[in-house]
Amino acid sequence: MAFELPALPFADDALESSKMSAKTFSFHHGKHHAAYVTNLNKLVEGTGLADKSLEEIIKATANDPNKAGIFNNAAQVWNHTFFWNSLKAGGGGQPTGALAEKINADFGSFDKFIEEFKAAATTQFGSGWAWLVLDNGTLKVTKTANAGTPIVDGATPLLTLDVWEHAYYLDFQNARPAYIENFLNQLVNWDFVAANFAAA
Ligand code: MN3
């Protein structure tokens, strides 16, 4: 059963007013994410991995240098689907309820969380991802390079931000800090984060 490109959880122009354009989605979802799906299907065809779940493929190939191509494409498929769900029109701001309390408890304050998340997203050298994860019961901010994904280490991802240049170049050119700021102010889907936290 071949993998398929999941549809965006919103219209491709739904985030225009939050500075993530339909043009960005036409490339980022329509070309980049789609290519990872196509490549993954080609690479696993006829192998023992073809009928495994995406998560199983990611975990099975993460530490095998001979399967780096499969890992990179599988993890990028997973990461991008998770990223689309981390976004919503009119998002950003602050969470409420149990998640807000947990952020205060584990980071000291919401502002401190923001500071750590911005630092991780800004300092990831080259391509990669910034994450909020639940790791052994504690919220942590992490970053991964290239296709890296926290599910390999057994942490539960709650939120992610793609900091590959292809994620922001059309809307922000080289200004990664402005893209990060905009994500936190206008795009974070805290309902998705809270649901991931509640299910963890
Ligand atoms: Mn991307």
Image (tube, rainbow, N blue to C red):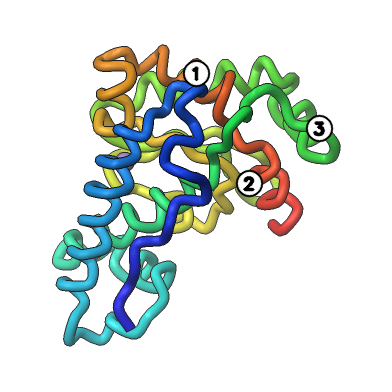
Give the residue type at disc 3: Thr
User: Residue 174 placed where, x, y %?
Assistant: 25, 15
Q: Mark 3 or mark 1: name the one nearer the start of the chain.
A: 3
Tag shown at residue 173? none
- Measured along the vertical axis of the image, is residue 113 above or below residue 31? above
Q: Position of residue 192 (x, y in %)?
A: 65, 46
C-alpha gap between disc 3 and disc 2? 17 Å
Q: Name the residue at 70% across, 42% down.
A: 191
Q: Are marks 3 and 2 in contact (CB under 8 Å)?
A: no
Horizontally, residue 126 falls left or right of residue 140, namely left
Q: Earlier in the sequence, mark 1 or mark 2?
A: 2
For the residue with label 1, is its CB less than 8 Å from the closest atom of ligand 1? no
User: Marks 1 and 2, how far apart in space?
Assistant: 24 Å
Q: Count of labels shown?
A: 3
Q: Residues within 10 Å of mark 2 (few under 14, many from 20)?
A: many
Residue 182's disc is 1
Is residue 146 found left or right of 65 in the rendered image?
right
Q: Alpha-carbon distance for marks 3 and 1?
A: 20 Å
The x and y percentages for residue 38 are 21, 64
Residue drawn at x 67%, y 37% as measured from the top left:
190
Q: Say what amino acid the circle numbered 1 marks.
A: Asn
Are the residues at dot 3 and dot 1 in contact (C-beta closer than 8 Å)? Answer: no
- Position of residue 183 relative to residue 192, above or below, is above
* Quadrant location of the C terminus in the rendered image: bottom right
In front of the other: 28 or 136: 28
Disc 3 secondary structure class: loop
Kind of residue indicated by mark 2: Leu
Q: Would residue 140 appear left or right of 165 to someone viewing this image?
A: right
Residue tagged by mark 2? 134
Q: Which residue is mark 3?
A: 96
Q: Residues within 10 Å of mark 1 (few under 14, many from 20)?
A: some
